[in-house]
Image (cartoon, helix red, strand yellow):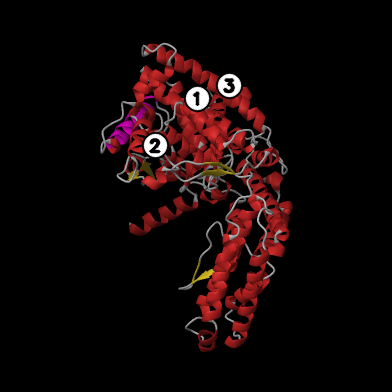
Amino acid sequence: MQNKLNFFAIFLILGLFSGPFASAQTSKESLYEQTSELGTLIVSYQRDVDAINDFYYPYSAGGTYSYPKETFKSPTQRKRLQDIDHDYLSKLKTANFESFSIYGKVDYILLKKDIESSVWLLSKEEADYKALSKYFTFADAIYALENLRRRGAYKDGALLAVEIDGITKQVDTLNLGFKKGILKPDQLKMARAISLSLKDRLKGFYQFYMDYEPGFTWWVPKPYEKLDLALTNYAKLFNGSDGTELIVKSNKPEIKGTPIGREELIRQLNAELIPYTPEELIKLAEKEFKFCDEELLRASAAMGFGNDWKKAQEKIKNSYVPLGKQPELIVKLQDDALNFIKANDLINIPALAEETWGMVMMSAERQLVNPFFTGGREISISYPTNAMEEDDKLMSMRGNNPYFSRGTVQHELLPGHHYQYFMNSRYKSYRDPFKTPFSVEGWPLYWELLLYDKGFAKTPEEKMGMLFWRMHRCARILFSLNFHLGKWTPQQCVDFLVDRVGHERANAEGEVRRSFKGDYSPLYQVAYLTGGLQLFALKKELVDSGKMSFKDFHDAVIKQNLIPVEMIRATLTNQPLTRDFKTSWHFYDQLK
C-alpha cells in the first residue's frame, strides 16, 4: 500500500495526474508565480555583482568582508562592475524577447533598466573621481597594498614600512596645500567617502598580516599608525560646506540638504517610470490638496468649528492617550482596520501574517528623524521617552493622537508594510533589486485612499485624522520637489508643514530632516501619494470596470513584488511590450 501511495505522489509531483488539482498547479499562471524565463539570468546578475563587491570591498579581521553602502569603490572594482554590466547587456540583446511570457518581458525590461542605470551611475562616479584625482595621488599606492592582501602575497616588512612612510608624506603634503572653498558640496561628500574608504582598505591590509607575518609585525605597526592618523585628518578637510548647502539651525541637529536640480529630478523620475515632470507633479499635488481642503472644511463644520479647521484639529491633537497606553491603541486601531477590510471583502490576508506582526518602541534619537511610527516586519512606535525635552514629549503625544494614528496603523502593518514584507519574501523575491519607493510606499498609501473612499472614517474626527495624513502626502510632494528645484529652503519646508498641514513644529522639523539627510532617494517623499494614485488608477481600470474582484486584484498586485507600478499594470493587462520600453502611462488622467 505504501509503495502505491508513493507512486501516486510521484505522478502528482510531475504533473502527470489529470485531475483538477494537477491542472490548477500546472497552469501557465502558476508556472510564473515564482519566476519567469529571465528569473535565472536576473539572479545570476545579482550574484555576479555581489561576487565582485565581496571580493573588492575592504576586508575586516576574522575573515569577513565589510562593505557598508557608503564605502567608495576602487577603480578596479568599478571597472569590473562595468564589465559585468556590459556582459549582461550583451546577453539581453541575444535573448528571444518576443517569445517570452508577459512575466518574462517585464523582467527583461526591469533588468535592462537596472543595468543601464548602473552603467550611468558607474560612469558618473568614474568621471567625478577623475575630477578629484589630484587630491588623491596616493590612492593607487594604498590600492596596491590591498591587492597584496587579496592573494596573501609576501613582501618584506622593511620595504612595506618605507612604502607606507612615503604615502604618509604624500597625504601630509596634500593636507597642507588644500584650499577651502574650491570644492562643491557633492565633491566634498565624495572626497570624504574616498578618504574614509582608503582608510578602511589600509586597515584591512594591516589586519590581514599583523601578528601572522613576523617581518610585517616588526616593521609596519608604527608607519601604519602614522598613515592611519594622516588619513583621518585628511578626511576632516572635507567635512565643511562652501555655503551652497541649505541649513536650518535649532537646538537639535541641523537640518541640512543640497538640492539636486531639475535635470537630475527628471532623470530619476524616468528611471522610476514616472512620465511626469516635477512641475506636473506639483500641480497634481495641488489638485489633491484642494480635495483635502474641501473635505477638511466639511469635517470641521460637522465638529462645530465652521471653517476654522485648525481649531478642530487642535481638539483632535489633544485626544492623545496617556503615557504607556500607545501600544494598546496601536493594537485596537489595527483590529479596527482589519475588521473593516474583512467586512468589505477587500483582501485575503494569511492567518500567519496576522499572527506574526510585532512592535518595538522608537528611541528618542530616532524620533528626531521619524516623529511618527514606522513599519515593516514590525511597527516601531513613536511616543515620548524620558530622554526627550518636555515640549517635545507633548508634541510627540499630540502628533500621534488616536485620530491621526487611525489612518496610518494599517499603513505600517496590515495590509501595508508588514503584509508587503510577508508576501514579498515569498513571491518573486528575486525582483528585490528592482523595488521602487513608488511601490514600497505606494501600496500602503493606496490603502489609505481606498479605506477613506470606502467610508472607514465614519465620524468627522476620524475624517480629520485621515485627512491630516492625506494633506501631509500632498505636502511631501510640494516641499521636496520645490526644495530640489531650488525654490524652497529647509526652513520654508518646515513652516509649510506647520502652517498648511497642522504639524507640531518638532514633528515638522523631523520630517524635513528625514527627507534631506541623504538616507532616502530625493523622490522618496514624492513616491507616497504618487504611487498610491498609480495603484488607485489601476484599481479603477481593473476593479471598478468589473474585470477583477478586489481580492483578485490585490493578490495579483502584491505577488509582483515591489516593482514600478507601470510594470505591474503591464503584467495584469498583458500589455504589448517592446525591448526598449519607455514610460508612457499618464495614470492621473484616469482619475480626473
Q: In which quadrant will I find the C terminus?
A: top right
Q: Disc 1 versus disc 2: distance between alpha carbons?
A: 29 Å
Q: Amino acid at mark 1?
A: Arg
Percent position of residue 76, x then y: 67, 67
Q: Is residue 333 magenta?
A: yes
Choose between 84 and 479: the one closer to the eye: 479
Location of residue 78 (image quadrant): bottom right
Choose between 135 and 457: the one closer to the eye: 135
For label 2, the crowd category at 10 Å Cα-Cα, with few meaning under 14, some 14 to 19 and many 20 or more, is many
Q: Regarding mark 3 in the picture, which secondary structure is present there?
A: helix
Percent position of residue 52, x then y: 61, 64
Instruction: Tell me what residue is drawn at x 54 percent, y 37 percent.
Output: 525
Q: Nearer the viewer, mark 1 or mark 2?
A: 1
- Against 272, residue 62 (above or below) is below
- Marks 1 and 3 close (CB-CB < 8 Å): no
Q: Regarding mark 2 in the picture, which secondary structure is present there?
A: loop
Q: Disc 1 versus disc 3: distance between alpha carbons?
A: 14 Å
Q: Amino acid at mark 3?
A: Lys
Q: Is residue 243 magenta?
A: no
Residue 418 seen in this snapshot: yes
Q: Disc 3 versus disc 2: distance between alpha carbons?
A: 29 Å
Q: Which residues are magenta?
A: 328-344
Percent position of residue 526, x then y: 56, 35
Choose the circle earlier in sequence order: 3 or 2: 3
Question: Residue under circle 3?
Answer: 287
Choose between 548 and 214: the one closer to the eye: 214
Question: Residue under circle 1?
Answer: 500
- Against 473, residue 175 (above or below) is below
Q: Which numbered dot is residue 414?
A: 2
